[in-house]
Image (spheres, grey):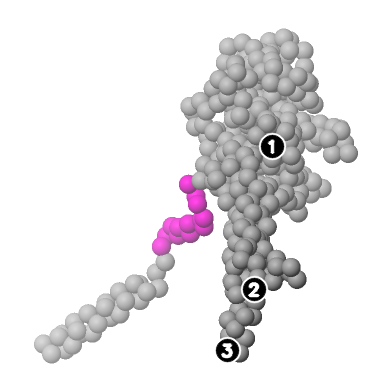
Amino acid sequence: MLVFYQHAKLLNALQRCSYALRKYTASPKKPHKEKAEGNTSERFKDLCKVHVVGGSGGQGSVSFMRSAGFEFGGPDGGNGGNGGHVILTVTRDRNSLGHIVPTIRGNHGTNGRGEKLHGKNADHLYVEVPLGTIVRSEEGTELTKLEEEQDYYIAVRGGCGGKGNLFYANSQDTTPRYAQEGAPGEERVLYFELKILADVGLIGFPNAGKSTLLRAISRARPKVSPYPFTTLHPHIGMVIYDDFHQIAVADIPGLIEGAHKNKGLGFQFLRHLERCTCLLYVIDLSVSEPWTQLECLKSELEKYQPGLSERPNAVIGNKMDLKEARTHFIEFQKRIDLPVIPISAEHRQNLVQLLKHLRKLFDNNREEFYG
C-alpha cells in the first residue's frame, strides 16, 4: 500500500513538471506577424489642398540695463528669432498624401530679451511627401516636381525676427524706447498632386482581372473580389527579368464609360497614366461584345488627354479559361485588327509570352520618356 502511494505521488509530480515545461517552452502553431508601425488606417490620397503658413518671427525686446554702479547702462533689448520655413522633402517611405493635414504651420521664433539676449531661430518644419508629387499654386500653376529622393521645395518662408531697442541705439537717440515686431510668415494655399511612377499601366473595366494579373506577374497583393470597384487606389508591382531588370506595373482602378466626366471613380486616377511609358488594355473576353470595351477605354483616355490613347500599348484578352472567352476571342481579333495576347490571369496561362512582349514593348519605347 505504501509502495502504491509513493508511485502515485511520483507520477503526479512528473505530470506537474511536464505541464510546467509545456507552459513555458511551447510555441503557437500559427505565429502572428507583429502589427505594422505607424497609422495603418491611413487612406490613399493623391490630391489635397493645403493651407501652408510659415512661422512668425519673434518680437524684439525693449529693455534697459540696470546694475549696481552702472545705473544708466543704456538699452540692452535683444532681437527676436527668425520663424521657420515649411520645406517639402521626398521620401520612399510614403506612397500616399493621406498623412498631409489641411493646415500646416511652421515653428515661431522666440522673442528677444533683456541683457542683450537674442531670441532663438525656429527650426524648419520638414514635411515628407512621396516620389512623384507635383506642387501647384491656388491658380493651378505648376511650381515644382519632386521626382528624386534628394529633391526638396520650400513651400513657404518664415518671417524675420524683430529688432530690439539695442539695434536702434545711435548717437542721436541713445535710449530708444521702441522695438520691432516679428514679421509674419509667408502664407498661401497649395495643391499637392501625386502621380505614381510606373513604367506600365493596366487599364480595363471593373472586374476585367487587372488585380489578378498583377498578383500573377509580381509580388504585389491587391485585393481581389468578384464585385466591381474592388481596387480603390493604384497598386504597383515589380516584374523582374533574368538580367535583373525590373519593370514597374501599376494597377489603375477600373474605368467606365464617362470616367472623364467624373463618373464611377471619376478621373482622379487617370492622371497616373500620364507618367506611364506603356499601356496594357486588359479586356474581359467572357462578356458579350468585348471589343466595345477597348473602344470605350481608348475614347475615355482621348477625352481626358488628347494623344494619351496612342501611347505605346498592347491588348490583353483575359479569362481564356472560360468557354465564352474562347468563343469571343476569334471575333475579337477580327474586329479590332490588332495583335491580342490571350491569357488566363487566374490560372497563370500564357504569362511568359505576355512578359516577353511587355519587355520588348518597354525597351523599344523607354528612350522616348527617359532619354
Q: Which residue is mark 1?
A: 136
Q: Is residue 286 visible?
A: no
Residue 75 is situated, as x and y percent measured from the top left of the image, at 64, 73
Q: Is residue 75 visible?
A: yes
Element on which disc 1 rests: strand
N-terminal-most mark, 1 or 3: 3
Find residue 75 and name its label: 2
Residue type pointed to by label 1: Arg
For residue 136: magenta?
A: no
Q: Main secondary structure of the magenta part?
A: loop
Residue range (magenta)? 28-41
Q: How far apart are labels 3 and 2 at the CA level?
A: 16 Å
Residue type pointed to by label 3: Ala
- Closer to the camera in the image, 202 or 99: 99
Residue 156 is situated, as x and y percent measured from the top left of the image, at 67, 48
Residue appearing at x 73%, y 22% in the figure? 305
Q: Are marks 1 and 3 in contact (CB under 8 Å)?
A: no
Residue appearing at x 62%, y 25% in the figure? 267
Is 71 rendered above or below residue 243? below
Residue appearing at x 32%, y 76% in the figure? 20
- Closer to the camera in the image, 313 or 119: 119
- Closer to the camera in the image, 252 or 154: 154
For residue 40: magenta?
A: yes
Quadrant containing the N terminus in the rendered view: bottom left
Residue type pointed to by label 2: Pro
Q: Which residue is mark 3?
A: 68
Element on which disc 2 rests: loop
Q: Quadrant of residue 181?
A: bottom right
